[in-house]
Amino acid sequence: MKVPPAINQFTKTLDKNQAAELFKLLVKYQPETKAAKLVRLEAKAAAAAAKEPVATTAPAPMLKFGLNHVTSLIEKKKAQLVVIAHDVDPIELVLWLPALCRKFDVPFCIVKGKSRLGTLTHMKNASVVALTKVNKEDEGKLKTLSESFHVQFNETVERKWGGGEMGLKTQAKLEKRQKQLEAERQKKLEASQR
């Protein structure tokens, strides 16, 4: 059965080495856990109760996740790198996301496993995550990954229909038919030579 190009592009995922490099970077920017958030808020409340000045710092860079949130980040051109899972069910949820990333010139990649993205976000599954900013020491790594993903995914649009692989029975039938046609052709050649 033929698979449309928009769906077939989700079979072309990152190889093992690229995925390992990507996940090394993404692990550094995991969002805080519920327990860490509770500790942070309790410390903030205790400081406010003691009438001490509460330091308000800019939030640390972290992964953004959730389909609607990542979509708005792409549309506002705030996302620097988008990572999409290949096994989202139903696939229609993320089917349009590569086209949106190409339109707004945001580098994206497709990785195996929504559960791998889920572990990064402290959830069971995550269909898509995005990086908006990184620390100074990781800017070079993000730039190299973004450039390679841009070439691999953004610039090379897959226009081929996928699937189309015939079963063993059909292959055997076609081989048999081809042999019969070849035999007939040989007979005609021998008859014409006489």
Image (spheres, rainbow, N blue to C red):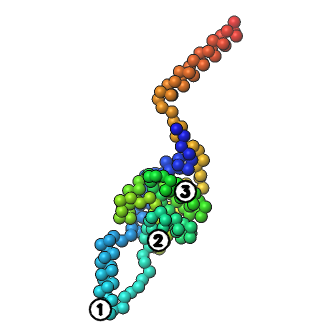
State which quadrant residue 106 falls in. Answer: bottom right
Disc 2 target residue:
134
Viewer-nearest residue: 111 or 15: 111
The C terminus - image quarter: top right
What element does badge 1 sit on?
loop
N-terminal of the two: label 1 or label 2?
A: 1
Say if mark 3 contacts mark 2, CB within 8 Å.
no
Residue lying farthest to the top in this orientation: 194
Q: Is residue 54 left or right of residue 170?
A: left
Neighbours of disc 2 within 10 Å: few (<14), some (14-19), many (20+)? many
Residue 139, position as x, y percentages in the image: 49, 69
x, y percentage for residue 173?
Answer: 52, 24
Amino acid type indicated by mark 2: Val
Residue placed under numbered mark 3 in the picture: 96
| Tag 3–tag 1 contact (CB < 8 Å) | no
Q: Is residue 37 above or below residue 116?
A: below
Name the quadrant containing residue 51.
Answer: bottom left
For label 3, count other residues whose C-alpha is less than 10 Å away and answer few (under 14), some (14-19) or many (20+). Answer: few
